[in-house]
């Protein structure tokens, strides 16, 4: 029985059962092509017409030596990678334009090269002279990094095979061009094929490959999502242009913990490591003011303290504004609804603004109680004590759920001079000697005890 042909768009990757001149997904013209299926030779009908080689099977109890890691001398980068660079690994780094991806990777390339790892930096966006200009500004000209400016992937792979480096950095994957794919550079087909070739080369030759990826306006890495599945590690370089702080976050890591972060500070001489992010995020915090609350969070395996700022003001509009920076807007709406339904505190007719100071982005639910405290503090015009940290998850019933790693949060707060904490009941607080821990069971009790309302 003949197999029905399938078609896909080279621009957006949408699949179709028949050819058409215009893609219904992205609206591009003449981008739909027929997908080539697997075959075993001329005239073959199916994959089963030819036997393959037997795959070697191993037991789960087989003991293998873990792959050796190469340190970069950049502690924050090594932390995010899970302890260093693993040989034959493929790493994808994404981030907004101008956030500092090329600066970070050029500094990393210099450190790896100084440590004895042969490193090649291939730029598809800049000439070699422009990369050298950045290296002079960063004072990296003494590093034995080899540069190349090329977009033809066939030439790049041939060069890498002959040079046999330990690390190859490709900046960026969207500029690579493979002559076997009939589409423009940056298209879905080209990005997918180039990522597949580079990842396969890394595994076959034992070369670590770092790919730089552009991001869309939604903050996702441009191109097909299959690229993120191909590679071993996916890192996002985050930060706000108005802040000097930059955060390197691991969202996937086969060789270490996911959601680990490394913190950097953008300076005139490049990116500087921040070994104590909590102190940096709280460095500009002045006297306690209404709407300001310190949240004790966990990013990966690292406790991080940051300041949440809220502003509640009467709204001149029929529909009050809800503006959030650094947190989930949907979760803010949930907290406001719980405060009104369970505690009888309405925010109708009030504009609500919430900001995470320092350009930090928080995703863990343990920030719920700190957000509620900031909102109530701003609404009641009552400041919390300056030596208090808050954390805990709020359920829709108004109950407070304990946050994981309570002990680590309290130890980090105590190290920075905080003497009291407000947290849900049930969390383990071992090792937090010297700190006053006020544990609450529900949001109503929290509102009544801390703000004298409820």
Image: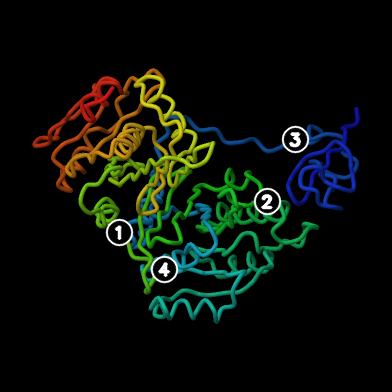
Percent coordinates x, y for residue 344 in the rendering? 36, 21
Q: Quadrant of residue 373?
A: top left
Mark 3 vs 4, N-terminal side: 3
Relative to 169, say whether 53 is above or below: above
Q: Secondary structure at mark 4?
A: helix
Q: Which mark is residue 107?
A: 4
Please name the residue shown 48% across and 52% down the image.
Answer: 236
Circle 2 Cα neighbour tier, 10 Å, few/some/many (<14 / 14–19 / ≥20): many
Q: Secondary structure at mark 1?
A: loop
Please name the residue shown 91% across and 41% down the image.
Answer: 43
Percent coordinates x, y for residue 92 in the rendering? 53, 53
Q: Which mark is residue 192?
A: 2
- Tell me the colour scheme of the image: rainbow
Percent coordinates x, y for residue 121 in the rendering? 52, 69
Q: Quadrant of residue 382?
A: top left
Measured Cα–Cα span from mark 2 to mark 3: 28 Å
Q: Are circles 3 and 1 on residues that touch, CB within 8 Å? A: no
- 168, 419: nearer the viewer: 419
Residue at image mark 3? 51
- Residue at the limit of the structure toward the top, as seen here: 397
Measured Cα–Cα span from mark 2 to mark 4: 27 Å
Q: Nearer the viewer, mark 1 or mark 2?
A: 1
Mark 2 vs 4, N-terminal side: 4
- Residue at the limit of the structure toward the front, as seen here: 316
Mark 1 vs 2, N-terminal side: 2
Q: Nearer the viewer, mark 3 or mark 4?
A: 4
Residue at image mark 1? 274
Q: Secondary structure at mark 3?
A: loop
Q: Nearer the viewer, mark 3 or mark 1?
A: 1
Q: Are circles 3 and 4 on residues that touch, CB within 8 Å? A: no
Mark 1 vs 4, N-terminal side: 4
- 35, 38: nearer the viewer: 35
């Amino acid at each position: 029985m003949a197999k029905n042909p399938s078609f896909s768009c080279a621009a957006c990757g949408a699949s179709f059962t028949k050819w058409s001149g215009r893609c219904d997904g992205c609206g591009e013209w003449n981008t739909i092509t027929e997908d080539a299926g697997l075959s075993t030779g001329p005239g073959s009908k199916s994959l089963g017409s030819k036997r393959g080689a037997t795959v070697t099977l191993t037991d789960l109890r087989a003991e293998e030596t873990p792959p050796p890691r190469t340190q970069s001398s950049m502690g924050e980068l090594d932390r995010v990678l899970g302890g260093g660079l693993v040989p034959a690994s493929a790493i994808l780094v994404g981030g907004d334009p101008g956030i500092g991806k090329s600066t970070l990777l050029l500094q990393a390339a210099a450190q790896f090269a100084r440590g004895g790892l042969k490193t090649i930096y291939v730029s598809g966006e800049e000439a070699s002279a422009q990369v050298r200009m950045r290296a002079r500004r960063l004072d990296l000209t003494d590093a034995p990094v080899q540069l190349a400016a090329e977009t033809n992937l066939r030439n790049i792979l041939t060069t890498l095979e002959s040079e046999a480096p330990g690390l190859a950095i490709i900046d960026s994957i969207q500029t690579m061009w493979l002559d076997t794919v009939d589409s423009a550079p940056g298209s879905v087909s080209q990005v997918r094929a180039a990522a597949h070739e580079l990842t396969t080369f890394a595994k076959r030759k034992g070369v670590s490959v770092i790919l730089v990826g552009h991001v869309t306006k939604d903050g996702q890495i441009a191109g097909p999502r299959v690229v993120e599945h191909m590679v071993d590690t996916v890192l996002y370089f985050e930060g706000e242009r108005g802040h000097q702080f930059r955060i390197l976050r691991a969202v996937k890591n086969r060789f270490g913990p996911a959601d680990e972060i490394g913190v950097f500070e953008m300076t005139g001489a490049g990116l500087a490591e921040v070994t104590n992010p909590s102190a940096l995020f709280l460095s500009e915090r002045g006297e306690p003011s209404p709407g300001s609350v310190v949240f004790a969070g966990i990013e990966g395996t690292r406790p991080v303290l940051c300041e949440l700022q809220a502003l509640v003001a009467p709204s001149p509009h029929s529909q009050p504004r809800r503006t959030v920076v650094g947190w989930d807007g949907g979760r803010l709406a949930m907290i406001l609804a719980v405060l009104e339904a369970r505690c009888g505190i309405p925010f109708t007719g009030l504009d609500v603004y919430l900001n995470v100071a320092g350009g930090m982005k928080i995703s863990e639910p343990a920030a719920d109680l700190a957000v509620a405290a900031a909102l109530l503090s701003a609404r009641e015009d009552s400041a919390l004590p300056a030596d208090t940290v808050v954390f805990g998850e709020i359920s829709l019933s108004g109950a407070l759920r304990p946050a994981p790693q309570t002990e680590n949060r309290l130890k980090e707060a105590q190290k920075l001079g905080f003497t009291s904490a407000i947290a849900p009941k049930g969390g383990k607080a071992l090792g937090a000697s010297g700190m006053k821990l006020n544990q609450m069971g529900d949001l109503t009790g929290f509102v009544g005890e801390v703000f004298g309302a409820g």
